[in-house]
Image: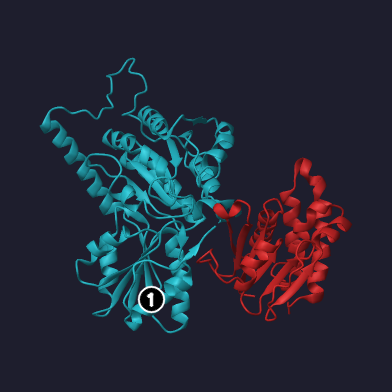
Chain colours: A red, B cyan
Amino acid sequence: MHGTEVVMAGFGGQGMLLAGKILAHAAMDSGMEVSWLPSYGPEMRGGTANVVVCMSEKPIGSPLIESPRGLIAMNLPSLDKFAPKVKPGGVIVVNGSLIDKDPGRDDCTVIRVDSRALAQEAGSERAANFVVLGAYVGATDVVPEEAVTEAIGREFTGNKAQFVPANVAAFRAGLKLGRETGVAS
Amino acid sequence: MAKVLMKGNEALGEAAIRAGCVHFFGYPITPQTEVPEYLVKRLPEVGGEFVQAESEVAAINMVFGAAGVGIKCMTSSSSPGISLMAEGLSYIAACELPCVIINIMRAGPGLGGILPAQSDYFQATKGHGHGDYKLIVLAPSSVQEAVDLMILAFELAETYRNPVMLCADGMIGQMMEPVEFPREGKGPPLRDNEWALTGCDGRKRRIVNSLFLAPEELQQHNLNLKAKYDLIAEKETRSELYGAGESYDLLVVAFGTMARICKTAIDELRQGGLNVALFRPITLNPFPYGKLREAMDAMPEGARVLNVEMSMGQLVWDVRYAAEGSREVEFYGTAGGIVPSPDDVAERIRGIVRGDEVAAAEGGEGHG
């Protein structure tokens, strides 16, 4: 893997910026160059809160990606906006808990995840963002499992440390699903 | 030292502390607010002071005062706020006081929008306050470079007793990248404050002043400033030539965020057999006219230059000035927070190679 980039998008509060930060941390700790570029403009109001994470063996040129190789869509506006832009052969993780629609991309690996149910099973409905992150990492193998779980452990400290087990369990549940349907070789 | 993942704005705040900055005065404005947000927490930890001023006008005059008493200090704002600081910048430069100003540029004019732009180039390098004065202007194109240039900014401010502006855009301010800080802990205070107003008990009083009513005196003051600016131009001009290789048939000129986007375009074009290089000014002032001209002169006769910037044509004036008519300089610019993608830039370059008529500005992707 020479590098990849993923757009992670959803409603504000669905945790895509945080999940993106965890992914960027995991990639950095694995020795890759990374960039994490959030949306901060008018889109944030009522539409999608998105972040594009670039991970590469080489220094990253443009952190802004028109056609990413990966997409995690947590809501329908995000799927509608970004799914048509994903590169052929890419990976699209769809939050099945909120989206019924098919992305209509037969040329991509589409993973539909009931993130809410899996997060509940893992111990916290709020960990749905880590379920979809797990699915993406499982399908692409872009970073090692341990790099992500360690990054989660470092992110949630102090009185937030109580959230680590559920977040890690949610991530692993997604990871399992991603590996079963994934494209990683 | 280990790498940490940080937002550009926060990394700038930490870099200021590593450079020895102990006082910050500012007023919030998107997309730079994380700079004061970071420093309001961090400065008290290192014995510093943070003041949220009542306006940008007040903030720059607080910087004027703190710099005058020999404190390492700074302010930070975004385009409309920097406009409000123009008068104070002229006074600080006239009084030859060291300080650092961050401008995380957003789209203008007027209130404009909050998305990234590079349309304060003239303001930073040619415009802002009245009179014959210059800022040193540094333009990073990554979060790591923002850190490195922030530390350099305080060094240059002190060495030349001149205000230094770090000019980045909303994308660098908002983006997270791994950074490594070149030194641990809080940086040192000013090496020399023999000019500062520290209380004249037991010594001759010092004067920090910009009023010279006698014309000969004021002219001499201007000549002294000019000599300093000439020295800065000779010693501190910085630039990068990317993808130079053996030869290149087209030279792209861009700075900051736009430069790294152009690098991606150039990498793609090179794989397709087009030899393109990038010239990136790192100091926007002093501008690297000489190095740019060298990079132009290294091309075969008739080869062209493409200037790319997120403005309606500002940097291009300096590029054409450097060319002195020796090269055709094409222009591609966007505004409003529209950031050209690598594909947009690559398509422009292919168009030039094909000989298409170049339209000044279109395309690009809105970066939400």
Q: Can the viewer see residue B245 in this picture?
A: no
Q: Furthest-top residue in view?
A: B201
Q: In which quarter of the image is residue B288?
A: bottom left
Residue at point 47%, 38% (across, down): B20
Q: Furthest-left residue in view?
A: B216
Task: Say which quadrant the N terminus of chain A sits in.
Answer: bottom right
Front residue of A167/B154: it is: A167
* Image location (x, y in percent) of residue B256: 42, 58
Residue A162 higher or lower than B208, as above or below: below
Front residue of A59/B322: it is: B322
Q: Which amino acid does label 1 sit on?
A: Ile
Tell me the subunit letter for badge 1. B
Residue at point 39%, 32% (across, down): B57
Residue at point 40%, 82% (across, down): B274
Q: Is mark 1 on a helix, strand or loop?
A: helix
Residue A185 higher or lower than A26, as above or below: below
Task: Say which quadrant the C terminus of chain A sits in.
Answer: bottom right
Left or right, B8 with respect to B134, comes to right
Left or right, B234 with respect to B5, comes to left
Q: Can the viewer see residue B350 in this picture?
A: yes
Please count the marks in the image.
1
Residue B193 higher or lower than B113, as above or below: above
List the residue tagged with mark 1: B349
Q: Quadrant of residue B357?
A: bottom left
Front residue of B112/B289: it is: B112
* Image location (x, y in percent) of residue B95: 28, 33
Q: Furthest-right residue in view?
A: A121
Dot 1: within a 10 Å radius of its alpha carbon, few (fewer than 14), some, or many (20 or more) residues? many
Residue A87 higher or lower than B81, as above or below: below
Residue at point 61%, 76% (across, down): A87
* Image location (x, y in percent) of residue B337: 46, 57
* Image location (x, y in percent) of residue A154: 73, 51
